Amino acid sequence: MPEKLGQWVIRFRKAILILAVALLIPSGLGYLHTKVNYDLLTYLPKDIETMQGQDILKEEFGSGAFSVLMTEGMSARDTAAVKEKIMQVDHVKNVIWYDSVLDLSVPMEFLPDDVYDAFNSGDATIMFIIFDDTTSSDGTIAAVREIRRIAGEQVYLSGMSAVLVDTEDLSEAEAPVYVMMAVALSCVVLMLAMDSFLVPFLFLAGIGMAIVYNLGTNMFLGQISYVTKALAAVLQLGVTMDYSIFLWHSYEAHLEAGKDKEEAMVHAIAETFTSIIGSSVTTVAGFIALCFMSFTLGRDMGIVMAKGVVLGVVSCVTILPAMILACDGLLQKTRHKAVIPDLGRIGPTVTKQAYAFLALALVLLGPAVYGYTHGNIYYNLDSTLPRDLPGIAANTRVKEKFDMTCTHILLLDADVPAREVRAMADEMKQEDGVKWVLGLNTIKGPAIPDEMIPDDLRKDLITDDWQLILIGSEYDVASDEVNAQVEKLDAIADKYDSGSMLIGEAPCTKDLIRVTDHDFSTVSVVSIGIIFIIIAAVFRSLSLPVILVAVIEFGIMVNMGIPAFTGTRMPFVASIIIGTIQLGSTVDYAILLTTRYRRERTAGKDKRTAVTDAVAASAKSILISALSFFAATFGVGLYSNIDMISSLCVLMARGALISMVCVIFLLPSLLLIFDGIIGRTTLAQKG
């Protein structure tokens, strides 16, 4: 079967190249028409209360997003003029300000004190903008851009939608640089590792086509997250580069054996296909494990990356061979001596010091476990964005002037009497960090008769089934203080209406913490379980999967433990995603070395010689593979101003190198120590 594939590729290589280039056009169009989601909170499970509340908000009130706009140093008349301009913007449903309740001819002092304080602080005043669509919808994003255009310098637009606009702009500006840096650094590594100046460019062209196909076919998913979009290309480049290197080395070996180029390529394709199927399956399995997250960002990334690996395999055994044969003359003319030397002499050193390396690993295990379990995780996604972004600057300014960071939204049964709503509001205002509680029944009172409330304001705050109440909080999203506050406010609301729902950024983020904590355990078990089964099937062994997975998991603990000692904060998805990706993509290093070890033991060599030869034969390939992964991700990690992207790339880059060190120096120790057990628990293994 693999040889027939090789013969087919050689026979139709010109057609393959024409088709490969032609497919770039629909793929490019698909990429341009794939919606990108910048609101990670939308990936929360749809059946939790906060997400159900968002749906009710949209269905009942015709709105899904709120923003706070602050004017500073402007007269009431000028502020009212700004409000009127904003009211004309598409997808702005309403703007609630002082003149929504009283005419400007009536002094603001007629408002109740808590209502006055909610809208005013010194020379600053705030208004609440209600959009007719969700936080991250195209309509809301377009409205935010238009509001910024017409607002002027004395106006600050804060809130999630404003931050999402900034994140989109920053991500779109940086994305091309990510790819260029990954390509440039990968090219440097390949120049050092390969023996031809041209072949790195063929590798990158073949993988580049697979990346474009992958990004283009994402259109069929409906949308992808900005994290997936930012990481997909560099991650696909990093994890599939091995396949191209293996094909080239196999092709060269057959040429040196005296075969002509077409026959050599047929055998190279057959060998590569057989070898990388096992390797790619573990990588795909790692990404598929992400699909078991209830926080569906994992499924988003898992599907895209698993698809990317499959397309990378297809490209490697079809497009790349066709390009190599088409450029054979130039490849021969651009040959040079590889800069990275052969690492054959490392084998005896590793086996001679095997117990020393094992002892070192045992010493490091304690600190690694401690750091792994004491990492500083953050959930507030805008806390690490550049402070000079307009949305971040606006959030900061509103906090400075009003001591308010976020707004909760309470959905209450419309039948709860006004007096009980006011009692509830009074009780909530006694809680630490609550600045104000505003709703139709909290605004109304002796000072403001019912008939003075405008109809449009009434419709925005109460329907036949629900009434909406806004709660201002001085606590930061995702902080322990706001999470405790959300629990207390929920408890108070339940006393007055057991069916009430508290929604908004802070309650959603609190759910995010709970959901992802559960996902961490689930994904870890699933990824280890799937890869354990694959390794057991590949080696027909019960002991080798335990050893190989243990080695990579140790590397993961070291990698994820380092931030605890450097004081580095990690995004909440890091502990879930990095462990799975590092296991799935670098366990290949361990499989490569172990495969050679098994071959040597089966040939009758003693355990020390078998391990020595396995290390000597595998070390250079593992080094090049790890350096390729490192090159594809490290530059992005240093460059990106989006900490979510930067942190994940740094962790992946460092993880590749740590896994490489673990496989070359720690795995041989375990193979030596447990050789007897391996022999008894592995089929066709000779002692």
Image: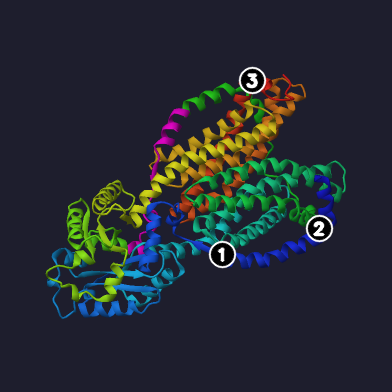
Residue 204 image offset from top left, x and y in percent: 67, 55
- Work out how far the residue at label 2 is from the one at label 1, CA to CA, in angstroms: 31 Å
Residue plotted at (39% across, 65% down)? 58
Q: Which residues are magenta?
A: 365-393
527 relative position to 262: left or right: left
Quarter of the figure with residue 600: top right
Query: For the residue carrying disc 2, how many other residues have a C-alpha within 10 Å: few (<14), some (14-19), or many (20+)?
Result: many
Type of amino acid under label 3: Ile
> Which quadrant is the N terminus positioned in?
top right
Q: Is residue 667 above or below residue 238?
A: above
Residue beneath disc 3: 677
Horizontal side of 607 relative to 92 (left or right) equals: right
The quadrant where residue 201 appears: bottom right
Colour scheme: rainbow
Provide the secondary structure element on which disc 1 rests.
Answer: loop
Report the amino acid beneath label 1: Thr
- The Cα atoms of the two marked residues, 2 and 3, are separated by 48 Å
Towards the viewer: 262 or 187: 262
Does label 1 or label 3 sit earlier along the sequence? 1
For badge 2, the amino acid type reads Arg
Residue 492 in sight in this render = yes
- Kind of element beneath mark 2: helix
Q: Residue at x 21, y 67 (%)?
A: 119
Specify whether residue 391 is painted magenta: yes
Q: Nearer the viewer, residue 531 or 645?
A: 531
Residue shown at 44%/57% (left/top)? 42
In the drawing, does residue 482 fall left or right of residue 370? left
Label ID, residue 13: 2
Q: Earlier in the sequence, mark 2 or mark 1?
A: 2
Q: Which residue is mark 1?
A: 34
The quarter of the image holding the C terminus is top right
